[in-house]
């Protein structure tokens, strides 16, 4: 948009400058030409008077002296002939026998008007000829021909044109500058608005400057900022509600859990109702934890986006530690976890240790419980130049393509509604946490079968 | 062994459930709802179960004040499960930290462990520490797992030795680095991670070496 605006403004500015400059150039040239014509015509008139006297007195000596002086002074040629076309005076290097002079003399004798002097321009070099008959009325007693040099007039025209050209370029530059400033003034607030709106879309706070640009855009900027505040506040309230609710529910949950646990001693260990009650309490607990974790992950996203927290941890160590912690659970479930390769150099990713551990817990928990008995769970990591990738894969049944696409949605559970275990929040939380830290969580089909989860996290730049 | 428990909990439901459950296991329970009462009554208890959300004082302040005058074992039992609260609780001298809701069996096990440690605190650990089938000979600088020497490097052994000197107790990273390296800057911190990974792999006893997120490590299972 800026380019288009600039093109239009600059074109307009240049057209205006040209419209002023071109007539000005013509007028200057014409004025100078006119000046030349007037002064030379006056000179010719003077010679006509002198020639008339010379013809009347039959003494051309004074006339010749005058013409000679004139020719010397101005460097221009003067030829005066009598009625029989014989030269009375030939001054300068102009002679009556020159074809141009002879043609002029003939035309003037026939009382034809002298030819017009063309408008001069800086490149004019051809001398201009002026001719006038001597005598009055129909009795022509001679002709005065004057050859005027145009060089000095052409030089004057060149100077004039130069000045006008320079002025025009200057004005054009000022106009272009104005156009650029104007375009920026109008377009920059639009860019800032765009950035602000994108920030809102990304769940961040918009900071659109409210003091630049046209008035309409300024009020729009203020509105965008207000809208951003409102959106964030709504999101914040939602997170707080979830966080508060799950927090407040912890006390009754704790009491319930303790009561249920103390019932165990008084009830026959195989009572199905009791076992089902315990299972439901556990499910409720997990759901609460999950909701709280999700609310926390989402509010962390806002905080990190606002430029907070530059915590980092060693991916390889955390992976080794979590695998160590999950191996007993895997053995209970009848699967095995292959530990990651050892490492000598830390792999520092931009993610707090606690969060990475939570993410890994989700992935390992899912692998242990969904890959099935006898499954082999492999853990590994790869380190690139700017990011490291954590890989947890299993050779269980895996997920279909549609399921993989939906697996990171809240409350989605493998096996659909009413699936035996899980809250459906684990991957949603992990996904949110990875995204918050500028990473990518990717579910893939493992070969030949099974699920492969890849978590790519940005590496922290090594300082110095 | 009957443990006299001082329960500091402002939620009546939780307090009643806890008191009843502990009574049923033979532990006499005194229940108070305010932090100020906890400060008066803790001398008569063998163990304090402390909630952090109290009506009059912050639980962490109560913990700090108790710690200033008494070594009585304190288990923080709270709804605040975030890493920061856990770490602050442990740093201020809590012996353990449990997040609500908690299983009765786990609570009882932790209480036992904490009381046992408090008793054992007076008697220093011997030269050989045994945890499950892991035998750590601090004098001979040798570690046997299921009867086989696992060939730890010097640093790996030193780390394990620091943890083995306080089995079942959380040791902070800071303390580990101070005792093993005598220093605690960032490079050492990363090196500690790497050595711990190696140590875990050589022990090959999953879950024996527990990480307490944001705080440190503990040798021995929960």
Image (cartoon, rainbow, N blue to C red):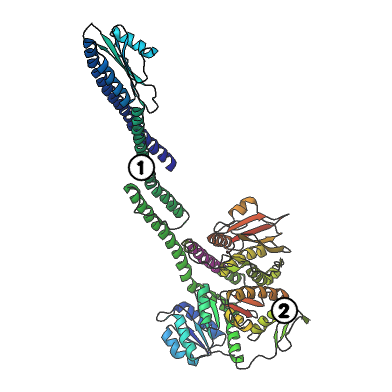
What residue appears at the point 62 percent right and 84 percent down from the top-left corner?
B179
Q: Mark 2 and 1 residues: CB-CB less than 8 Å, in contact?
A: no
Placement of the N terminus of chain A among the 4 image quadrants: top left
Residue at the image point whose x is 36% and y is 11% from the top: A102
Q: Residue at x 61, y 74 (%)?
A: B187
Q: Report the mark closest to the observer, 2 or 1.
A: 1
**Boundaries of the magenta span:** A283-301
The residue that disc 2 covers is: B153
Relative to A328, A260 lies left or right = left
Where does residue A372 sit, x and y in percent of width and height?
70, 62
Q: Which mark is residue A174?
A: 1
Q: CA distance from mark 2 to mark 1?
A: 77 Å
Nearer to the camera, A346 or B112: A346
Q: Disc 1 is attached to a residue of which chain? A: A
Q: Quadrant of the C terminus of chain A?
A: bottom right
Q: Is residue A105 visible?
A: yes
Q: Secondary structure at mark 2?
A: loop
The front one of A29 and A442 is: A29
Tell me: A359 left or right of A24.
right
């Amino acid at each position: 948009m800026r380019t288009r605006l600039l093109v239009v403004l600059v074109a307009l500015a240049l057209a205006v400058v040209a419209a002023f400059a071109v007539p000005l150039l013509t007028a200057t040239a014409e004025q100078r030409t006119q000046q030349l014509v007037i002064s030379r015509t006056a000179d010719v008139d003077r010679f006509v008077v002198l020639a008339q006297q010379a013809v009347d007195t039959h003494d051309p000596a004074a006339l010749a002296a005058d013409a000679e002086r004139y020719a010397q002074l101005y460097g221009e040629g003067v030829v005066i002939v009598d009625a029989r076309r014989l030269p009375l005076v030939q001054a300068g290097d102009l002679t009556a026998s020159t074809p141009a002079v002879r043609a002029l003399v003939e035309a003037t004798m026939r009382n034809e008007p002298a030819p017009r002097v063309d408008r001069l321009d800086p490149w004019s070099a051809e001398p201009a000829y002026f001719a006038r008959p001597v005598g009055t009325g129909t009795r022509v007693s001679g002709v005065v021909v004057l050859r005027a040099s145009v060089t000095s007039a052409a030089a004057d025209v060149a100077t004039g044109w130069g000045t006008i050209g320079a002025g025009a370029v200057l004005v054009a530059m000022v106009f272009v500058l104005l156009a650029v400033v104007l375009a920026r003034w109008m377009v920059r607030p639009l860019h800032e608005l765009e950035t602000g709106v994108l920030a809102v879309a990304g769940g961040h706070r918009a900071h659109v400057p409210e003091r630049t640009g046209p008035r309409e855009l300024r009020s729009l900027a203020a509105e965008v900022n207000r809208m951003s505040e409102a959106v964030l506040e709504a999101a914040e309230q939602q997170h707080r509600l979830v966080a508060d609710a799950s927090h407040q529910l912890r006390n009754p949950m704790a009491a319930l859990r303790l009561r249920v646990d103390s019932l165990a001693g008084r009830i026959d260990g195989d009572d199905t109702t009791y076992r089902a009650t315990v299972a439901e309490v556990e499910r409720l607990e997990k759901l609460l934890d999950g909701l709280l974790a999700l609310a926390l992950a989402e509010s962390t996203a806002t905080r990190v986006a606002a430029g907070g927290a530059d915590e980092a941890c060693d991916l390889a160590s955390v992976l080794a530690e979590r695998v160590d912690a999950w191996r007993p659970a895997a053995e209970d479930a009848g699967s095995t976890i292959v530990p990651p390769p050892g490492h000598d150099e830390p792999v520092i990713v931009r993610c707090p240790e606690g969060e990475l551990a939570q993410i890994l817990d989700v992935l390992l928990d899912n692998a242990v419980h969904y890959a099935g008995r006898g499954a082999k769970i492999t853990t590994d990591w790869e380190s690139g130049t700017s990011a490291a990738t954590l890989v947890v894969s299993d050779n269980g049944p895996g997920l279909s393509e549609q399921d993989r696409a939906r697996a990171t949605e809240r409350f989605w559970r493998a096996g659909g509604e009413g699936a035996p275990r899980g809250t459906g929040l684990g991957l949603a939380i992990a996904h949110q946490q990875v995204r918050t830290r500028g990473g990518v969580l990717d579910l893939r089909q493992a070969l030949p079968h099974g699920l492969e989860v890849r978590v790519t996290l940005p590496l922290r730049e090594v300082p110095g | 062994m009957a443990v006299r428990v001082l329960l500091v909990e402002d939620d009546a439901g939780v307090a009643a459930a806890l008191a009843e459950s502990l009574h049923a296991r033979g532990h006499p329970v005194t229940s108070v709802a305010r932090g100020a009462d906890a400060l008066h009554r803790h001398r008569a208890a063998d163990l304090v179960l402390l909630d952090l959300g109290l009506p009059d004082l912050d639980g962490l302040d109560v913990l700090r004040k108790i710690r200033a005058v008494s070594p009585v074992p304190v288990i923080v039992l709270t709804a605040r499960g975030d890493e920061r609260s856990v770490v602050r609780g442990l740093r201020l001298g809590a012996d353990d930290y449990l997040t609500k809701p908690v299983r009765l069996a786990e609570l009882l096990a932790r209480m036992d462990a904490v009381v046992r440690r408090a008793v054992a605190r007076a008697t220093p650990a011997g030269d050989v520490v045994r945890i499950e089938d892991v035998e750590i000979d601090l004098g001979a600088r040798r570690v046997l797992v299921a009867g086989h020497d696992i060939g730890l490097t010097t640093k790996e052994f030193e780390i394990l030795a620091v943890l083995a000197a306080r089995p079942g107790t959380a040791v902070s990273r800071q303390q580990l680095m101070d005792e093993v390296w005598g220093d605690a800057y960032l490079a050492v911190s990363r090196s500690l991670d790497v050595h711990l990974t190696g140590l875990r792999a050589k022990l090959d006893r999953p879950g024996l070496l527990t990480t307490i997120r944001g705080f440190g490590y503990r040798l021995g299972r929960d």
